[in-house]
């Protein structure tokens, strides 16, 4: 006979914040999210890649801001009243992520999450942890820590730290 803790662990749902980029819905672990803010202009830093929009001052903390629409090569990002910045705690850092909008928080059981599709070596799916099925909707579940610590995103490491030390 299976004990209650084993059954509860197997049936426990994980919560994801859902957000949109273009026409696609994505999800990330809700525990990584610190807050959600409306998009306001940021201070641009010279010689950063185009997807690093700049930095913002969040209650005395200088936060690098990444536009995921540019990072994922989506056409012409539009900044409107629905554009938001998701402030996250990732790998001990506070990072802002610009998205088209935030939809909801959903709970997914393990059986609602399918493995990511396998494509050829040219397509990078290493940041996708699975595809979630929820209410006739497909969510692309992103490992935000893996994405933010990837080789091309390492360029962010000095952005917030150097500005913080200058302000001190």
Image (tube, rainbow, N blue to C red):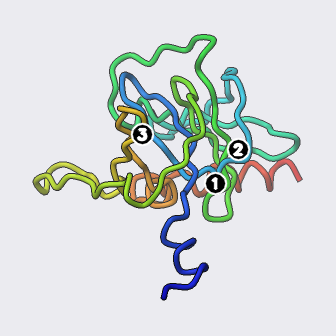
Q: Residue furthest bottom?
A: 1
Q: Residues within 10 Å of mark 2 (few under 14, many from 20)?
A: many
Viewer-nearest residue: 5 or 92? 5
Query: In 3D space, how far apart are the residues under numbered discs 3 and 2 (Cα atoms)?
Result: 32 Å
Across and down, in percent, residue 81 comes to 63, 11
Q: Pick the residue in front: 63 or 39.
A: 39
Secondary structure at badge 3 equals: strand
Mark 1, mark 2: which one is toward the viewer?
A: 1
Q: Earlier in the sequence, mark 1 or mark 2?
A: 1
Mark 1: give few (<14), some (14-19) or many (20+) Cα within 10 Å: some
Determine whether 2 is above or below 87 in the image.
below
Mark 3 or 1, nearer chain start: 1
Q: Going from the N terminus, do you reach mark 3 or mark 2 first?
A: 2
Question: Real-space Cα distance between discs 1 and 2?
Answer: 15 Å
In the visual, does 127 lie left or right of 52? Answer: left
Residue sitting at the far front: 1
Which residue: 35% across, 37% down?
Answer: 138
Q: For marks 3 and 1, give the CA distance.
A: 21 Å
Q: Secondary structure at mark 1?
A: helix
Name which residue lies at 66% across and 48% down: 33
Q: How many marks?
A: 3
**Residue to which mark 3 is pinned:** 134
- Residue at screen point 71% across, 54% down: 162
In this rendering, the label closer to the viewer, 3 or 1 = 3
Residue to which mark 2 is pinned: 63
| Residue 100 percent coordinates (x, y) | 51, 23
Residue denoted by label 1: 32
């Amino acid at each position: 006979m299976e004990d209650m803790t084993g059954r509860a662990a197997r049936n426990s749902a994980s919560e994801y914040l859902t957000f949109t980029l273009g026409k696609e819905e994505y999800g990330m672990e809700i525990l990584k999210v610190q807050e959600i803010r409306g998009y306001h202009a940021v201070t641009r830093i010279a010689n950063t890649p185009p997807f690093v929009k700049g930095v913002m001052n969040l209650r005395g903390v200088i936060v690098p801001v990444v536009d995921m629409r540019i990072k994922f090569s989506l056409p012409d990002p539009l900044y409107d009243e629905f554009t938001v910045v998701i402030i996250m705690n990732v790998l001990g850092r506070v990072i802002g992520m610009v998205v088209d909008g935030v939809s909801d928080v959903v709970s997914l059981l393990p059986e609602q999450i399918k493995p990511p599709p396998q494509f050829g070596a040219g397509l990078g799916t290493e940041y996708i942890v699975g595809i979630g099925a929820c209410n006739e909707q497909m969510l692309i579940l992103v490992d935000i820590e893996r994405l933010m610590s990837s080789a091309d995103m390492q360029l962010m490491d000095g952005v917030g730290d150097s500005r913080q030390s200058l302000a001190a």
